[in-house]
Amino acid sequence: MNDHKKITLVYDKECPACHFYCKRIDIEKTAGSLDRVDARAASAIMEEITRARLDIDQGMVLKKDGTLYYGADAINELAKIGVNKGWLNRLNTLFFRSRRLSRLLYPLFKLIRNGLLKLLRKTKINNLNNKQSKYF
């Protein structure tokens, strides 16, 4: 049994859409336990993401079995191990279990996230220290 496996989902907790999705998404118990981490808080996983040169402002990260999945690949991997209970989990499985569909739809969700953060006047996380650090 793989119950001891820790799977880590790193996302922007200040984004209302990201927070809603990540708090309600669930995985099969046989896949492991899902640890949700706020990308705005200093952590070892954020250091690892930065060392891997993954821009957290452009996509969430899922760490599973020592591998970092980024953006569309992260949401696709979540769908593969997701439960089929509740409307959000069912929609997640329906839309994102397909890698092709995940890659097609993820940019739309990223656009929505960036728009929400701009409306809320939130700064970017800017883990890669890019010059432009605000959405507005």
Image (cartoon, helix red, strand yellow):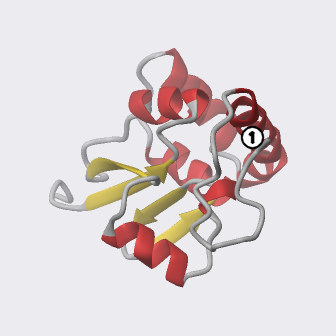
Q: Is residue 85 above or below residue 44?
A: above
Seen in the image, is 104 located left or right of residue 53?
Answer: right
Report x, y in % for residue 13: 47, 39
**Helix, strand or loop at disc 1?**
helix
Q: What's the residue at 42%, 27% (across, down)?
A: 24
Q: Which residue is mark 1?
A: 114
Q: Is residue 29 above or below residue 17?
A: below
* Quadrant the N terminus occupies: bottom left
Q: Quadrant of residue 97?
A: top right
Q: Residue at x 61, y 25 (%)?
A: 91
Residue type at the position of mark 1: Asn
Question: Outermost residue toward the bottom?
Answer: 51
Q: Quadrant of the C terminus?
A: top right
Q: Position of residue 130 (x, y in %)?
A: 72, 71
Q: Is residue 45 positioned above or below 135 on the image?
A: below
Q: Quadrant of residue 116?
A: top right
93 or 23, which is in the foreground? 23
Q: Position of residue 36 (x, y in %)?
A: 35, 47
Q: Position of residue 68 (x, y in %)?
A: 50, 71
For image coordinates 63% across by 39% down, the residue present is 122
Question: Relative to the observer, which residue lies in front, 12 or 123?
Answer: 123
